[in-house]
Image: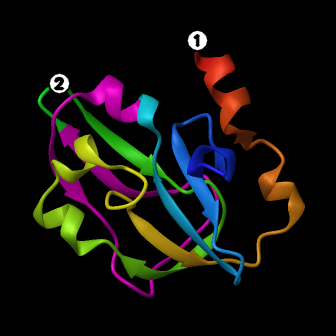
Amino acid sequence: MSIQEKILCSKSHEYLLDNEDGTYTIGLTDYAIEQLGDIVFVELPEVGSEFHKGESFGAVESVKAASEIYMPISGKVIETNVAVMDSPETLNEDIYEQGWLIKIESSADQVEFADLLEYEDYRDEIE
């Protein structure tokens, strides 16, 4: 099973991967990276920060544009991918394995998941 078959995507182009232990990995979708172009800067939150669904938790800048990054569900940051902040171009190379952004703990209820799309549906909607 590919990672795309396991993720949920937000309409603001973040992906959410259930790690199946009460934690989730969040990153930007391949579509978002394609639209941004070459990434030159990534800003991510500190471990321990808490965010509600829809709140901005970071920013990404490319040669084309700057963009906020939003929480697909509410949660507490348990890990930040420092390597991406040090080498932002990683996002252009491997968004799922190396280019994830944060990991969170979340007890979000099903209501928070209601507007997230499976990858295939997400791709259909943006095309």
53 in the magenta segment: yes
Q: Please state which of the two labelled residues, at mark 1 or mark 2, is closer to the viewer.
A: 1
Q: Are marks 1 and 2 in contact (CB under 8 Å)?
A: no
Quarter occupied by residue 40: top left
Q: Secondary structure at mark 1?
A: loop
Which residues are drawn in magenta?
32-61
122 on left or right of 80: right
Q: Is residue 88 above or below residue 24?
A: above
Query: x, y (%) of residue 103?
Result: 49, 74
94 on left or right of 124: left
Amino acid at circle 2: Lys
88 on left or right of 108: left
- Residue drawn 32% across and 38% down? 67
- Residue drawn 39% across and 85% down? 47
- The residue wearing badge 2 is 64
Q: How many marks?
A: 2
Tell me how the rendering is colored: rainbow
On residue 117, the disc is none
Quarter occupied by residue 34: top left
Q: Secondary structure at mark 2?
A: loop
- The residue wearing badge 1 is 127
Crowdedness of circle 1 by 10 Å Cα count: few (<14), some, many (20+)? few
**Earlier residue among tags 1 and 2:** 2
Query: x, y (%) of residue 96?
Result: 43, 54
11 in the magenta segment: no
